[in-house]
Amino acid sequence: MNIVIENGRVIDPKNGVDRSTSLFVADGKVAGLGEAPAGFVADQSIDATGCVVCPGFIDLGARLNSIEAELAAAVAGGVTSVVVPPDADPPLDEPELADRLVHRGTEIGKARVLPLGALTLGLQGERLAELAGLKKAGCVAFSQANKPVTDTEALLRAMEYAATFGFSVWLQPQDYWLSRNGIAHEGEVSSRLGLAGIPVAAETIAIGTIVQLVRDTGCRVHLTRLSSGAGVALAKRAMEEGLPLTFDVGVHHLLLTENDIGFFNPHARFCPPLRAQSDRQALSDAAASGLAAICSDHTPVGADDKLLPFGEAKPGATGLEVLLPLTLMWANAAGVRLPDALARITSAPADVLGLANGQLAVGSVADICVFDPEASWQVTPDALKSRGKNSPWLGYMLTGKVKNTLVGGRVVF
C-alpha cells in the first residue's frame, strides 16, 4: 500500500531531518521525503497537521505478560519494536520458546517482537543456555533479566562464549548479596519508613565486576536500567576507555525519586529502586548528553499484586503507553531539544541493537509514529490498553498523544 503523510513536522534524529514536509511510503519502506517518487500514487493519505512524524519508538525493555494486549499497548504508544526480557514463564531458554514468541508476534501483526534469550538455563546462573540455537530463533541478545549470576566464573565463561560468536550480553547490574533483602533505596526515606534498603554499592560493585570481565573477554555488554549517579560514572569511564559497553535508563527513573514512595505507594516500587535526587539528575544528564538510551521498562502487574503493603507488592509499572509523554516531560524539564529527546527512544536503541531501524531515510523500513505533541490525556485504567494498570501516573494529565503508528508500512494504530 502506498501512503502519504502530509503537513507534519518530520523529525528524523538519525539523519538530522527536522522540517515540515511530506513523507511517502511504498512497499513497506520510506519511498520519499518532500517529493513523491516517480509514478507514486497514494492509496491512503494521513493528515499530520500539528503533529510530529518520526521513526517508531524502539523499547529496550518491555515484558509481555499478555502478548495481544501488550503489543496493542505498544502501537498505541508509538512503539514499533519491543525488546522482551527472558524472564517469562517459562524462561526463554530454549529455541522453540523464542521461535514461538516471535511467530506469535508476527501473527498478531502489531509491534515487532525482539526477544532476549536467557543467558543461562532457567535463568539459574549456572549452566549456559543454547545461545546459538536461540540466536537462530530470533533472539537479539542474551540476558538474565533481573536474575543475577552469583557465580562470577560462570559469568566469565558465558561472556567468553558470547564474545567468540559476536553475541551481545545484557545485564542488570545489581549485586545479589547487597540487594537480596532490600525494598527501597538505602537512604533517608527508607530509614524513615522502616524499609530495608538497597545501597548504591549494589549497583557499582556489579558494574565494576562486569567492566573488568568486558576488558578480559571483549564481550559486548549492554547495562540495563542504571539507577545511580555512581553507576553512570563507572559506565561512562568504561565507554571512554573504548570498551564495547552501552547502557539505558528507565523513563520513570528520569522523573521520580525515592521521595515519590510517599506513604508507601506500591506504584512507586521499582527494580532497581528509585534513588536520590542527585542520582535522578545524573541519569537525566546521561540521557541528555546522548550517553544513555531511554526505555519504558514496561512491567504490567495485576491489580492484586499492587494492592499489597509496599514491601510485598510486585515492583514495576506499565510503561509502553506513557513512554512518549514521559520522555517529552523529561525533555521539557531538562531543556533537551525535541529531536534529541526522540533520538533516545529511536536511533539510540537501534544503535544498541545494531539495527538499521529508528530512522526515516529513503529505503529504510517504514516504522513510523505520528503524534500530537500538544495533546493532553489523563492516565486512567480505561485509557490504557495494557492489562497492567499499575502506574505512579494514574490520574495525571500527560502531554503527547499518538495519532497513528505504522509498522512495515502498515497502519496498525
Image (cartoon, helix red, strand yellow):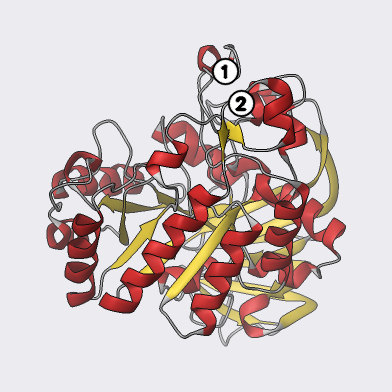
Any mark on residue 413, and which? Answer: none
- Spot occupied by residue 173 in the image (x, y as percentages of width and height): 44, 53
User: Label 2 vs label 1: CA separation?
Assistant: 7 Å
Q: Which residue is pictured at 59% across the width and 12% down the height? A: 307
- Spot occupied by residue 73 in the image (x, y as percentages of width and height): 56, 38
**Residue 369 relative to residue 91: left or right:** right
Residue type at mark 2? Asn
Query: In terms of image quadrants, where is residue 53?
Result: bottom right
| Nearer-the-camera pick, 166 or 197 | 197
Q: Which residue is pictured at 59% across the width and 39% down the height? A: 273
Q: In this view, does 32 lie above or below 230?
A: below
Q: Name the residue under label 2.
A: 390
User: For numbered disc 1, what is the local secondary structure?
Assistant: helix
Looking at marks 2 and 1 on the same chain, the residue that comes earlier in the sequence is marked by 1
Any mark on residue 306, and which? Answer: 1
- Spot occupied by residue 370 in the image (x, y as percentages of width and height): 69, 58
**Is residue 413 in view?**
no
CB atoms of marks 2 and 1 within 8 Å: yes
Query: In terms of image quadrants, where is residue 162?
Result: bottom left
Q: Which residue is pictured at 42% across the width and 37% down the height? A: 64
